[in-house]
Amino acid sequence: MRVDVVSIFPDYLAPLDLSLVGKARTAGLLDLRVHDLRDWTTDRHRTVDDTPFGGGAGMVMRPDVWGRALDDVLDDGAHLLLPTPSGAPLTQRTAEALAGEQHLVVACGRYEGIDARVAEHYATRPGVTVSEFSIGDYVLNGGEVAALVLVEAVARLLPGVVGNPESLVEESHGAAGLLEYPVFTKPPSWAELDVPEVLLSGHHARIARWRRDQALLRTAARRPDMLDALAADPGAFDAHDL
Ligand code: ADE
């Protein structure tokens, strides 16, 4: 998969050299390129923003600068992703769908955002898909952290990136639509807390049942909305995933 990220703070994306995403890049599973938006400015001050039409606080990113950048970076079949707090929520389902694509381009806005004509213009370009996405109901200073989140969520789903693909099946927001059960390792007793007896029993069916119960209890306590979603769409619920 190819991913291009365009930002006025390319250094913000440095963590993508590390850990699993960094290894995926080294292994050639992910071709990730980070660009400085200011490379597409034409004035001495390398200006990327201006005051909003209609007045109001803050600055808006200019469509002409973004247009030059995106004309260079977007190719046929690319998916343009615009992080914004007013976008559609990024979910595990979104990440799964994006992991099946060939080319993602993430355009990181700053200030009050990118001139709205940029999304509108590229949405009409044949062969290009445009999505505005949010990583949560809070406001960040720019799209870079959201781009990090998106790239990590997608890259770990690419074949060969996570060593044991089984670990993708049981995790929170996985196919079962539940939060993950609690996990434990050695030592069996720590800080006067014991690992649940059943996990030491070696009884696979009992362990599987305990984990399913814990996943349901946790989801009910922390994310009742997820249980509501399962109840509304029981077809999404597959007992084999538990
Ligand atoms: N930019 C600023 N806040 C954001 C958010 N919550 N999600 C995505 N992009 C953003």
Image (cartoon, helix red, strand yellow):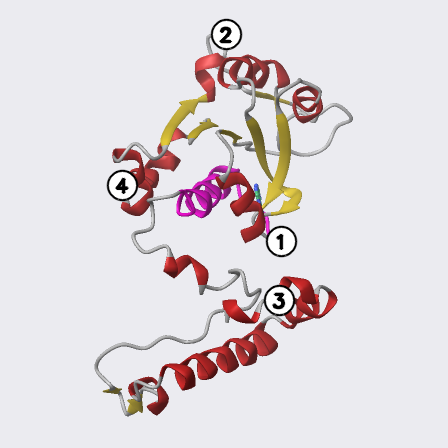
Residue 29 in the image, given as x and y percentages of width and height: 34, 35
The residue that disc 3 covers is 237
Residue 34 in the image, given as x and y percentages of width and height: 39, 27
Amino acid type of the residue tagged 1 in the rendering: Asp
Q: Residue at x 47, y 82 (%)?
A: 209
Q: Residue 155 occupies which quadrant of the picture?
A: top left
Q: Which mark is residue 42?
A: 2
Of labels 2 and 3, the one closer to you:
3
Write down the region rendered in magenta. Answer: 137-158
Q: Earlier in the sequence, mark 4 or mark 2?
A: 4
Of labels 1 and 2, the one closer to you:
1
Of labels 4 and 2, the one closer to you:
4
Tell me the CA gap for discs 1 and 3.
Answer: 27 Å
Q: Residue 28 occupies which quadrant of the picture?
A: top left
Residue 93 in the image, given as x and y percentages of width and height: 57, 50
Which quadrant contains ligand 1? top right
- The local secondary structure at tag 1 comes to loop
Would residue 66 be found to the left or right of residue 201 on screen?
Answer: right
Q: How many marks?
A: 4
The residue that disc 4 covers is 23
Q: Earlier in the sequence, mark 2 or mark 3?
A: 2
- The local secondary structure at tag 2 comes to loop
Would residue 84 be found to the left or right of residue 36 on screen?
Answer: right
Residue 91 visible (yes or no): no
Task: Give the vertical position of 29 relative to 121 (above or below).
Answer: below
